[in-house]
Image (tube, helix red, strand yellow):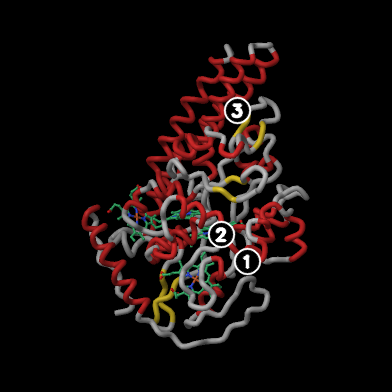
Amino acid sequence: MRTAQPPLGNSPRSAVGQWSLFILMTGWILSSCTPAPSRSSSESRPGFTSPSTGHQSFQASTFYTKEMNPSPTGYGGGVPYDKLERYPQLNVLYAGSGFAKEYKEDRSHTFAWEDLVHSKRVTEKTPGSCISCKTSGIEKVWNEEGWGYAARKMPEYVAMGLGSIGCTNCHEPNTFQLRVAQPGFKDAMANRGIDLTKASKQDMKTYVCAQCHSEYYFEPGTDRVIHPWEKGLDAASMYAYYETKPKGFDRDYTHTKSRTPLLKAQHPDFEEYSAGIHAAARISCADCHMPKQVQGGKRVTSHAIGSPLNTVETSCLWCHKGKTKEWMITRVRYTQDSVAELSNACMDALVKAHEAIMEGESRGIPTSVLEKARSQLRHAQWLWDYTASANSMGFHDGTGSMRNLARALELALKVPNLVGH
Ligand code: HEC
Ligand code: HEC
Ligand code: HEC
Ligand code: HEC
């Protein structure tokens, strides 16, 4: 019964209950699998190792895909469209940060290294810590240098030609067990009291993604990767943490015009997902983004990790029984359109807030008033950016996204009043 799908009802209780049953079944199906060894070329495939289990050529050929498919809702997808062009307000909001130089929609893991190397955001001063989530070379570098790699500079690693993300970012090279390789994530999870070596397979199917798809900053002085999760994973808790100015970290950039000390959210997909309905039902990132397929009579996992809306049948309908592809896409679009509309209103209000502060400063209003306005703008922009910088346009947690954006809008709209605009 390798191809058995979980029976799922439509009511929340039955779906969750039966899902737990499915987790048990999946564990059994995969652990009882003893595939034959097979050969596959590793040439020009960064981080390729031959697993001790079979069908690696299927996983490899799907993982190293160079396909760039648009998303049916037009938000995600693998086409690297220019976000600064699509959302012109970003040119104002990110002024002073590298994101004002270049900000493109993400594409598949095969491109991570070349997109980093060619990014206009990377300069001779960019710290080595940037390699943490872009290359399978991270393991070797870490074993040789420990945290020393973080404070070295990117051009040294570019010269080494490390290559993009590969199998070992998520798999133990010999046993092919799921594991994480990003040192900052290991530290952050240990600080939260989570022992990754004891994590369940279902949790690992989220953690392997979370090691890179999450918020972080570089510690001043050492450039270590730190995840700001000491007070919690949600936007408000992370803000409260940042407000303690940990190890002197007080900003990602200073706005060139309003001189506001700002935080730049970095793709908090894991955090956003964690508050959503699917995480509550213990559904992992891989359950949607790496759908199962039957190949040669065996159930295997697609490694072409992209928008699940291009694979609704295998990504969603095995749980959402009785629904159609169109129905699912319409529901996702409804959430995404709602979030995009509110995000757009936030961007307009934030732009006006920056302008009001600039104008207030030119009028010579007291520094204490300006500081208060800047601090409120910083808070508002963080709450907006948390959702805007995550990659699902709110799908992973529609309700939470709307709440953060509503708070951001409220704070931003009041900034002009604060400076008597
Ligand atoms: C492993 C099972 C599973 C998979 C896979 C899955 N879902 Fe769900 N989904 C659930 C459960 C459980 C709920 C909670 C409500 C319920 O029990 O019906 C839910 C709720 C939803 C909701 C309503 C809640 C909301 O936030 O609006 C939407 C929309 C949804 N899923 C879309 C999707 C889409 C799109 C995919 C594929 C990309 C997907 N789901 C994949 C199990 C799943
Ligand atoms: C219930 C299914 C589901 C789960 C679970 C889920 N996602 Fe998603 N994810 C989606 C959907 C649907 C989109 C929207 C895709 C689009 O706009 O085309 C998306 C979008 C994304 C994107 C942007 C995709 C693109 O095409 O640019 C990233 C990155 C992402 N998710 C990462 C994650 C990570 C990391 C996790 C776990 C922490 C996760 N997702 C959990 C369904 C899911
Ligand atoms: C981004 C993380 C990630 C990367 C990178 C990755 N895998 Fe996987 N791999 C997974 C996940 C998640 C599973 C599914 C585990 C499950 O459902 O039991 C998996 C499952 C597998 C399996 C078990 C059989 C199957 O299809 O479920 C094999 C074999 C495998 N991967 C090989 C590879 C190879 C070869 C590479 C490199 C070309 C690779 N993986 C890269 C995350 C990854
Ligand atoms: C080693 C770090 C790393 C790991 C592990 C990782 N990602 Fe990514 N992911 C990235 C980077 C970097 C990009 C952007 C690549 C680019 O645009 O050049 C990306 C892009 C994506 C995209 C956009 C692809 C597209 O075609 O639109 C999705 C979806 C995604 N990741 C989901 C996941 C999921 C799900 C997992 C876990 C199974 C995962 N990622 C694991 C770093 C990682």
Between residues 136 and 352, which one lies in front from this camera angle?
A: 136
- In the picture, measured across the screen, residue 158 lies left or right of residue 367, that is right
Q: Ligand 4 within 8 A of label 2's CB?
A: yes
Q: Residue 316 at x, y = what percent?
A: 37, 60
Residue at image coords 49%, 81%: 55
Q: How many marks?
A: 3
Amino acid type at circle 3 is Val
For marks 2 and 3, give the CA distance: 36 Å
Q: Nearer the viewer, residue 181 or 50?
A: 181
**Where 87 falls versus 169 (above or below)?**
above
Label annotation for residue 182? 2
Residue 151 percent across, percent down from the top left: 69, 52
Residue mark closest to the camera, 2 vs 3:
2
Q: Residue 152 carries which label?
A: none
Point out the tag, 2 or 1, that comes first from the N-terminus: 1
Tag 2: residue type? Gln
Q: Position of residue 198 (x, y in %)?
A: 39, 64
Read off the residue under disc 3: 351
Question: For mark 1, what is the residue?
Answer: 143
Give the quarter of the image for residue 317: bottom left
Q: Is the CB–ligand 4 distance for label 1 below 8 Å? A: no
Q: Is residue 45 visible?
A: yes
Please name whichever residue, 86 or 105, is drawn nearer the observer in this view of the structure.
Answer: 105
